[in-house]
Amino acid sequence: MMTLFLEKALRFFEPVGSFVLMVSRGFRFMFSRFRIGDTLIQMDRIGVGSIPIVFLASIFAGLDMALQFEVVMAPYGAKALLGKVVTTSIIRDMGPVLASLVMSARVTAGIASELGMMNSTQQIDALRVMGVDPLDRLVAPRLAAGLVMMPILSIVGDFLALLAGLGISVAVGHVPAPLFWSGVRDALTAQNLTNAFLKPLFFGFILTSIGCHYGMRTSGGAYEVGRSTTKAVVAAAVWILISNFLISKLLINIWGLSA
Amino acid sequence: MIRFEHVALGYADRPVVQDVDLEVPDGKTMVILGDSGSGKSTLLKGVLGILKPQAGQIEVNGSNVGDLEENELLAYRQRIGMVFQEGALFDSLTVGENIGFWLWEHTDWNDEKIEERIRTLLRFVGLESVIDKRPDELSGGMKRRVAIARSMAPQDPLVMLYDEPTTGLDPFTSRSICDLIRQVQSEFQVMSLVVTHDLHDAFRVGDLFSFIHDSRVILTGNREKIERSDDPFIRTFLST
């Protein structure tokens, strides 16, 4: 009975242990033997390839937020605060979370299916036989690319969302552009900027590490590759939302409730 | 010489093969035959040092593979050519990059020297014209040929391991792959272990044959000995 319980407990925690091991070894390779060529290729695939979808999502999020806030704030005569409210919402939460969720559908799915397919066609075994650690060649460059590209994409996406918000505020809300920009400047506090940088950095790690984890554990054929890709995307989305809340709470505890 | 002495190999506490005794003399090809899931490929993983024996020992040219440290395994594997089922070529790389992969990873050779080695190997397998193609542009037989060339990239091999080298190929292509396996053996005087369930291909490439059934080796010998066997499993295998 006890042995059965222990076996079940081990089976439950085994994926966690394997994830921690993969990430720690991946980081060790990243710092001990940085593969610049492979990392640049991954930065192109993960980052440059995601530009259209992330920027499109950011622009429409900016348009929509400015529109909704304008409708809510106008009756209170608070349209002068539109720039500050839109900026705070975008750079603290909406921008990083939206960009990461959009990226998870593309990047996490791509990594999980690529590595899963490599595993099921014995390409990863072939790497090992040729004396190359798959964590060095496959995982470390993807982790590095996610950590670099996600903040860049998210911050540029935030800027585009703000421009879109400015356009709607001026065109629909008749808010003077200088007034909107002064609100934007007010919102660029250390706390908000920390949110804007820290969250996508962490989300970049989640996107790539979860994709690698599920991909490296895939065995079997096309059905299994499909299954682990779906699991990876769902897990990445869930962990992005959970960690978004936790980081928000942590930063509020550190900085207080100031906007 | 490759020697298995009372070897058990498997995963965790579950042995896949047990009490295996085999001997492949220098320059000979042994074919491991058996039904699916009988542990044929597991023996290759033992020779590569990917799986450590749970019991017994595997010796290759006097070295006990189970005792080799990770860095010693890297040097050891340079002389072992492994051809995976369906090739296992890296599909993000070209044929040339696949063959040169090991050289770029582990040597300080310049690009010209590596390309020369790649072209030599491709000429050997009769495929020099596909150097810039990607694996998905190749037929099944061409992929196996490239995989054989890739497995010989580090240096001339001492041992060649083939995991189901003709599975999924038409009879004509299978025959040409078997001829290539013979050519590698005669040209480099390598010891080879070939895992297959195809008896015709086995007789084409092998000098010695070993049958695995229910996790154990049930018979080892030359073609004549196999054909004379009264073992019911082998009789069934031979008649199908």
Image (cartoon, coloured by chain):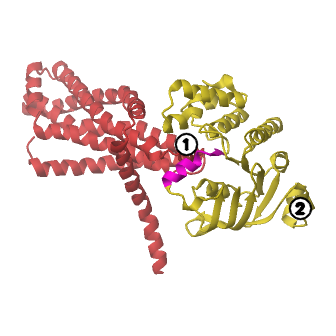
Chain colours: A red, B yellow
Q: Extreme front residue here?
A: B62
Q: Which is more toward the observer, A136 or B28?
A: B28
In the shown orientation, is residue B233 left or right of residue A20? right
* Residue B79 on the magenta segment: yes
Which quarter of the figure is the C terminus of chain A placed in? top left
Tell me which chain the residue with mark 2 is part of. Answer: B
In the shown orientation, is residue B67 left or right of residue A143? right
Could you tell me the amino acid type at mark 2? Answer: Arg
Is B235 situated above or below B196?
Answer: below
Is B23 situated above or below A192?
Answer: below
Q: Which is more toward the observer, A172 or B110?
A: B110
Q: Which is more toward the observer, B18 or B63?
A: B63
Q: Residue tagged by mark 1? A: A118
- Is any part of residue A79 visible from this angle? no
Give the quarter of the image for residue B144. top right
In the shown orientation, is residue A82 left or right of residue B230? left
Give the extent of the magenta segment: B70-82
Q: Extreme bottom residue here?
A: A1
Q: Residue tagged by mark 2? A: B235
Residue at point 35%, 48% (across, down): A28
